[in-house]
Amino acid sequence: MTEIRVGIIGLGGMANVHIESISKLEGVRITALCDCSSEAVKRAGDKLSIAGNRRFTHYLDLIASDEVDAVLSITPNDAHFEIVKCCLQHSKPIMTEKPFTRTFEEAYELHQLYLGNPIPSMVGFSYRYVPSFRYARDLIKQGKIGQVRHIFVQYLQSWGVPIYDTPMNWRYRSEITGTGALADLGSHMVDAARFMIGEFDEVTAQMKTFIASRRDPATGAEGIVDVDDFTGFLATLDSQVTGVFQTSRNAYGSGNQLELQIYGELGTISVGCERGNELTWIHPNAEHPASIVTEVLKVPAKYELAQMADFFDMVRGHVREELPTIQDGFANQEVLEAIYKAAENKRTISLAEFRSHHQAAGGNR
Ligand SMILES: NC(=O)c1ccc[n+]([C@@H]2O[C@H](COP(=O)([O-])OP(=O)(O)OC[C@H]3O[C@@H](n4cnc5c(N)ncnc54)[C@H](O)[C@@H]3O)[C@@H](O)[C@H]2O)c1
């Protein structure tokens, strides 16, 4: 395939980021656009000079177009399931945004279809492409901090705090988003932990909504917020690593703060997405082993890789093992569901128990 012709579904905030990344790549051309808002299609279509017959308001038309080789789906979470399913049915490579789906049932069905037709796929766990996160993963695998004992992971944002008076939007409505901070930000925490440490074994959790209603700009009335503003959970990963996680969209003073501290027998590694080109490594002083040294390491250039470049390389047949596929989307959603159940039932949920219940129920809970 000399040139990849890409179609983009969902033309809001995150689409701008991906369109900008694609503009820097050779051999990839945006040939089709779709949004349920015809205004959004016109605005982006005019900006990108897309022919009128390749501007769509229904995703089915874009996916079926023979002028589209690969699809980017950047819609709110309620459309992820149908769009991925349609791409699987048409065998069109797909990059779909996180969270993978709203519910575990949706994720399960897509995973089953994917196992029968493993098309090139990526789920938008974009923090795998932060250079320091990739570097940390390598250092941990090389044994630089020895056996990992425990990790602390937080992802904090502030746009939900009272002073901003953020109005009702789709991120506060469970029928569109699934869960709140958990799906939105927690899905990234779960992926970062799976990426660097390994699989989740069990979880226990608390979820809180701090602001119960928000003004709906469409009606002027108060709309009920039925998702979490905050989720905290404890987990065991990889049989022996304890994890402490928190995520909030109501944390005054935070920016876009995904941070991990990984504590091992021989040292500690800290990374954060807001300082993606450096990593802090704390370890015993080689000359005075009873004291410690804190080093801030610059991340070597070999850890730089653009998410979109990785996706299109995969479409061309070059698959890197770090790329987050539908398999990762499914595993991620399974953990999110276990966290949700743990908070709802106020008890520890083991992933093995969760799976066996699900299988016993014939794939449906
Ligand atoms: N990976 C990341 O770091 C990251 C960051 C931000 C957002 N996201 C994800 O990207 C997705 C989109 O978020 P956003 O901030 O761009 O949202 P947004 O609200 O800014 O834009 C969504 C766009 O999709 C359109 N849309 C809605 N339903 C549609 C449908 N059925 N068919 C076609 N178009 C439809 C809307 O009209 C809107 O233009 C979400 O799933 C979000 O979780 C990921």
Image (cartoon, rainbow, N blue to C red):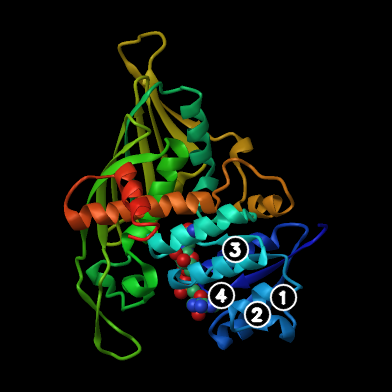
Q: Earlier in the sequence, mark 3 or mark 1?
A: 3
Left or right: 174 in relation to 99: left
Three-letter amino acid code at the position of disc 3: His
Left or right: 111 in relation to 260: right
Residue 11: numbered disc: 4
Question: How far, Cα to Cα, is label 4 from label 2?
Answer: 16 Å
- Residue most toward the top? 287
Of 71 and 90, the residue lying toward us = 90
Disc 3 to disc 1: CB gap under 8 Å = no
Q: Does residue 67 appear in the picture of this structure? A: yes
Left or right: 48 in relation to 189: right
Three-letter amino acid code at the position of disc 1: Ser
Disc 4 CB within 8 Å of nearest ligand 1 atom:
yes
Report the residue at 55% width, 65% height from top.
84
Report the residue at 55% width, 59% height from top.
113
Question: How far, Cα to Cα, is label 1 from label 4?
Answer: 18 Å
Query: Which residue, given by chain and number where applicable, does mark 1 sit on?
Result: 65
Q: Earlier in the sequence, mark 4 or mark 2?
A: 4
The image quarter containing residue 293 is top left
Three-letter amino acid code at the position of disc 2: Asp
Query: Which residue, given by chain and number where applicable, does mark 3 sit on?
Result: 18
Q: Earlier in the sequence, mark 2 or mark 3?
A: 3
Of 266 and 108, the residue lying toward us = 108
Query: Considering the numbered disc 1 on the image, is that residue within a helix, a strand or a loop?
Result: loop
Three-letter amino acid code at the position of disc 4: Leu
Residue 61: numbered disc: 2
Expressed as whole percent of the image width and height from the top left, the position of residue 45 reads 67, 80
